Image: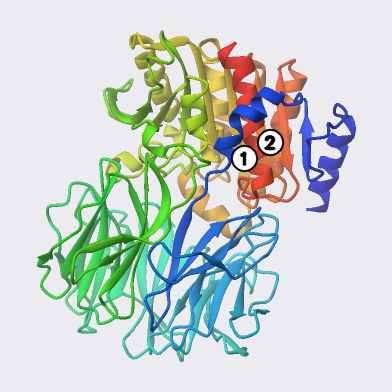
Amino acid sequence: MNQRLSIACLLAATIHPTFAQTPENLVVDGIPPFSAELKRDAGRYLEFRAATFASWHPTRPEMLIVTRFADSAQLHVVKMPGGDRKQLTFFPEPVAGGLFDPRAGEFVVFAQDSGGGEFYQLYRFDFATGRSTLLTDGKSRNMDPSWSNAGEWLTYNSTRRNGRDTDIYVINPREPKSDRLVAQVSGGGWEVRDWSADDSKLLLAEYLSINESRLHLCDVKTGKLEEVTPRGGEKVSWSAGAFAADGKSLIVITDKDSEFLRLCRYDLASKKLTTLAPNIRGDVEFFDLSHDRRTLAFVSNEAGVSVLRLLEARTGRALASPKLPLGVISGVKWHRDNRHLAFNLSAAKSPADAYSLDTKTGRVERWTESETGGLNAGNFVEPELVRLKSFDGLEISGFLYRPDAKQFPGPRPVLVSIHGGPEGQTRPGFQARINYYLNELGLAVLYPNVRGSSGYGKTFLTLDNGFKREDTVKDIEAFLDWIARDPSLDKNRVAVIGGSYGGYMSLACMTHFSDRLRCGIDIVGISNFLTFLKNTQDYRRDLRRVEYGDEREPAMAEFLGKISPANQAAKIAKPLLVVQGLNDPRVPASESEQMVRAIRASGGQVWFLMAKDEGHGFQKKRNVDFQFLTTAQFLQQNLLN
């Protein structure tokens, strides 16, 4: 980190004089000052907020939520639907969720990192004193806390032993010295999925890739592991699991013998798999089993839209399910009363907010109503689903948001926003600041879901692996051809933007289609796969090799070097904006720094923005605001003009 900081300081010493609006924590290189007009027009769009459910109070229908009222997201308590949000934590760094004490609700266990480094620590916040106590070692990465059924022990995974493997630990947060290692594992993808009814066993998931994962039983006392999912010729995903009420079977989500992820019952003795919801048109994404293990709530992804359903867990009989607005659902969680179900919902006309369903009455209630900067969310644009054929005949799709044709007549410039992952999927959720591009700049915004995206079956998911990596770039070319055929879109004014893997895609498009693009924006993107795999954090490296290819093999190393944008910088003939967090553990800052150097060495134009207190994407409001204003100005100068 010290070496990275010195690089940032050297860059800062060579840039144009800093202007008054630049926070000290930012490196601003080649970016002109914002106009007063831009700050005025965009100001309202900087005040969007969101709220997400974190945990139920154990004895009362009260929610713990995460939302932001100052610079970073913090914990709040809401005591009723539409009630006031009482802030609990007041840290400069954002808080990443929390869990109520399941016995009496006397404290909350929450996670927090520093500077975006993602080395999360667990803390206990006591309501009686308002103080927070560190529970973990303060150095390693500690994730996925999960309470036992009796509410005494909390399990989590940690890289404490060697910085690479995510071993399993348990702790009684009331007595921090009780912390102990339960199971020593190999690999960076281990998580606890559930506790058995008597709290003697853990159900563990071992993630190897988006297409391959396994389930194991772990004895809490001895740490003995038993793999319970079968191995065969094909790679199978067992993406979620929980103990069924009989203790002899599991409720799972798997794509075994299926193109899509299905909700199933898995008998531990016979290994028999029984589908519980056979008529779902798409992936089942996640589920939560009520505390009495009688009722299943699960969410399916159907053409990008979330559908929430309820089932009787023992028989699979469908129960009455709520009718909800079209959008994206997350955070589904049962209250201990086995009646109330919490979830988050985000839609085109509504920010992410916390809701509840009373499963006895069918009543849905909104617990939070996040602010939209005084703008009327009812006026925001709904997306349209776009389907087309790529270079090899494969059907690909995306979501297009069009500006108001009456306000902005004629062919409109297009911003093509490519998701990360690469296993991600763009969904029709709330657009937040992006509404500024639509409503004020008159940009059309296109979100492609290229091959390799999730949500379209496991075959589609693997079509970009290894030596097929640049087929995804060819998919973007198919979208550019589609734009050229639409008379309401301006084929001569197109830009690309993406974050993480989407940042690589943006850079790759700039090297391949510079003649068809006006400009590009790369946010924490991979510029060279070889240096990325060398420098990404140890706990991630093997997981990424499965997706991108193993650079230790000579043929793969040659291929990855050939397709890396940093090695083709001379082909980028249009302006580029690069955004990076200095403390990024996933795509290190060196990836952006070497891209900036390569562009300038070849005579190209590049703006560079780095935050010294951020990681894989900006989270603090002052940094997010500056990034947005920079992006809006970049698009005004290079796409609109």
Q: Secondary structure at mark 2?
A: helix
Q: Secondary structure at mark 1?
A: loop
Residue 566 visible in the picture: no
Answer above or below: position of 313 versus 474: below
Answer above or below: position of 562 versus 248: above
Q: Is residue 167 left or right of residue 477?
A: right
Coordinates of residue 393 in the picture (x, y in percent): 26, 23
Residue at image x 31%, y 87%? 197
* Earlier sequence position, callout 2 versus callout 1: 1
Residue at image x 25%, y 65%? 297
Answer whether labels 2 and 1 touch (C-beta < 8 Å): yes
Residue at image x 40%, y 61%? 82
Coordinates of residue 66 in the picture (x, y in percent): 52, 62
- Residue that numbered label 2 is attached to: 592
Residue at image x 51%, y 35%? 502
Query: Could you tell me how far apart the alpha carbons at marks 2 and 1 are, in whole angstroms?
Result: 7 Å
Q: Amino acid at mark 1?
A: Val
Coordinates of residue 7 in the picture (x, y in percent): 83, 41
Q: Amino acid at mark 2?
A: Ser
- Residue that numbered label 1 is attached to: 524
